[in-house]
Every structure is written in C-alpha cells, then in structure tokens.
Image (tube, rainbow, N blue to C red):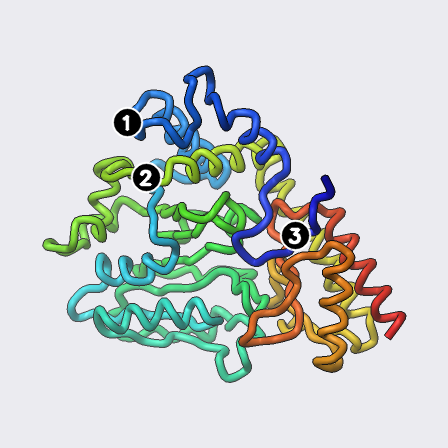
Amino acid sequence: MKRAYNFNAGPSALPFEVLQKAQAELLDFKGSGMSVMELSHRSKEYDAVHEEAQSLLRELLNIPENYDVLFLQGGASLQFSMIPMNFLGKDQAANYVLTGSWSDKALKEAKKVGQTHIAASTKEAKYNSIPSVEDIELSENPGYLHITSNNTIYGTQWAEFPKLNNVDLIGDMSSDILSRKFNVEDFSLIYAGAQKNLGPSGVTVVILKKDLLSRIPENLPTMLDYRTHVDSNSLYNTPPTFGIYMLSLVLQWAKDLGGLDKIEAINKEKASLLYNAIEESDGFYKAHALPGSRSNMNVTFTLPSDELTKDFLAGAKEAGFVGLAGHRSVGGCRASIYNAVPLESCEALRDYMNSFKANN
C-alpha cells in the first residue's frame, strides 16, 4: 500500500503509528473482547481512556489545575454560539478580531446573542496578515476578546498573542493547537475542533478557566451550559468515545515524539521548505500571507494564471498529492501541513513545486 501525500485542510492526516495502533486494537480493546466503539461510556475501560486523554492534554500543554478540560461535540462552530450565551453580559460587548472566515462566522453568531464590537480587522486587505497587538481597540465594557489563532483558508497565524488586563481572552485554536508552545494562562477559554492536529472529526476540546463559570447565567439550555459538562466530566450524555480514544493515541504519539518543543521545531522546518520554494521561485509562486503573519500550518500560494494552477493541481494529483487546491474564496493552492504530515511529504511537495516551475 502506498500512502498518499495528504495535505487536506481537515479532516486531515493522522500519524501512521496511531492508525496502526487503532487497527491492532479495533476488534479487542485491552482484552475486553470488544472494540472501543462498543464499550459503554460508563465502563471502567472507557473511563481509563477518557482520563488518559485529559491527563495527556494537561501534560503536553501544561494546563494549570484551575482550568477544566472538556470533550464536547458540535465542532468549533457550536462554540461560536455557546461562548456569548455563557459569557456575554447584558451590558457588555463581545469583542472580535477578524482575521478570516472563521472569525467572521464566530462574530455572526455572537451578534444573535448580544452586543458586539470589531476590535481589529484585516478584511480590507483580504486577510493577508494578522493585526498587530497595538492595533486592537477594545470597546467600552468588553465581555471578552475573541481571536482565531490560525486561519486555514488564508494561511495566517498569530505569532504573538494579546496579553490583556481584566479582559478575558478567548481563542479558537482549531487548526494550530498542539503545534507549538504557548502559555495557556494567557487565555480564559481555548477551544479546538480535533480534526486538524488532535484526532478525527467529532470531538471538540475546550480548556476553560474555572473562574468563568460564575459568570454563566441561569436558564440556559442544559447542553449549552458549560457547567453541565464540567460537573459531569464531559459525560452528561454519550460522548464521541472512539474520537476521544483516537485523541488519546495522538496525544501519546506527540509525547513520545518529544512534546511541543520537538513538534514546533519540525513544523517550522516543514513550513520553511515550502516558503523558501515560494520565495526562490522569482515570482512564479506568490504567498497570500505577508511575512510575519505566515502560518506554519497552512501554506497558501498562487501561480501566474488559472490555467497553470489547474495544470499544477492535475500534475500533483498524478504524483500522489491530495488536498492542494486552495479554498474557493481565495483560489490558488494550499498545503495544510499539520503535525501528522511528515517532513518527507513536504520535501516531496517542494521538489514537485521546483520541477513544475522549471518546466513552465
């Protein structure tokens, strides 16, 4: 079997070792005579999986004890609504930094709940950069500031996160969590869909500062109240058990690899290969994102014409590359190089880019 060069934006590549481990345990999980997918979520066998996933995430991200770790459903998109429903006070404004499509969507949902304010935006420049921290202008009486740490469609990423006094920072880290070191304590809430760096689709990780719980209003729908999931350890209803099992395997793989120090170094090396190919192409390839804002997770670029772009993608497909077409709102090409994408895949793509440029 020949594995594809998988550059899908999400669901995306999973570590080969993780897939092998899951395959070996699929029919009989630790002598239970059952698959993980068949275990009761109230069983001691599944409870061990659940606790292991939480423990590994705390260890890898250095999550303090005054934060809860939740495994929810509904994707990051449900968090767009839950966050203002739980934490936007009556006389407050939810502040958003707009850096791409997902922050736009988060703002749209918050507007349905209460007052909002755009604290900074790069929309007029087609989201080709991240605003500087100095450009952020908060509203009066801000309920929180929301940012999207990495933008899959436009290929931009925050290099430095805002540090706020007396204002809660909330981060959508769906596409770069576990890819680099950062200080969890800079945030009051972090959320991330699993399908980029953490595991398969279907699980949403929420890291929530316990102090926030006192702000939640009464009479929210039960499933949309964070206290429901904190009080039940994310077991109020049946969780996505297989997805959480896969998440635990990915986290163990990340730990065995060397943790975030090693992962961050590899990701920088992978991204440098592709950005160097772009910069050394004499304008044949052009990066969408400006230097200083370029993502180490999603490398976006264009070619001189639509015809050449089609030829590039057709040739890439024949060579075994998957997922390189840019998002329809941007066009061009996009290589999503999440943690599980091996360095060898990026080297192969670099070589293909150089060869295609030389022939065209």
The picture places residue 299, in percent across and down from the top left corner, at: 65, 63
Q: Are marks 2 and 1 in contact (CB under 8 Å)?
A: no
- Crowding at label 3, few (<14), some or many (≥20) Cα neighbours within 10 Å? many
- Depth check, front residue: 176 or 29: 29
Report the Cα–Cα distance between label 2 and label 1.
10 Å
Report the Cα–Cα distance between label 3 and label 1.
36 Å
The picture places residue 208, in percent across and down from the top left corner, at: 32, 47
Three-letter code, disc 3 = Asn
Q: Is residue 154 above or below residue 171?
A: below
Looking at marks 3 and 2 on the same chain, the residue that comes earlier in the sequence is marked by 3
- Depth check, front residue: 116 or 317: 317
- Is residue 347 found left or right of 9 in the rendered image? right
The picture places residue 153, in percent across and down from the top left corner, at: 55, 68
Residue for point 49% across, 60% down: 149
Q: Is residue 233 visible?
A: yes
- Crowding at label 1, few (<14), some or many (≥20) Cα neighbours within 10 Å? few
- Name the secondary structure under disc 3: strand
Please identify the quarter of the rendering in which residue 284 is found.
Answer: bottom right
Residue 6, numbered circle: 3
Residue of label 2: 239
- Is residue 227 found left or right of 285 in the rendered image? left
- Depth check, front residue: 191 or 183: 191
- Name the secondary structure under disc 2: loop
Report the Cα–Cα distance between label 3 and label 2.
28 Å
Residue of label 1: 42
Q: Are marks 3 and 2 in contact (CB under 8 Å)?
A: no
Q: Point out the image quarter for the C terminus.
A: bottom right
- Is residue 161 found left or right of 78 in the rendered image? right
Residue for point 31% across, 30% down: 41
Q: Residue furthest bottom?
A: 124
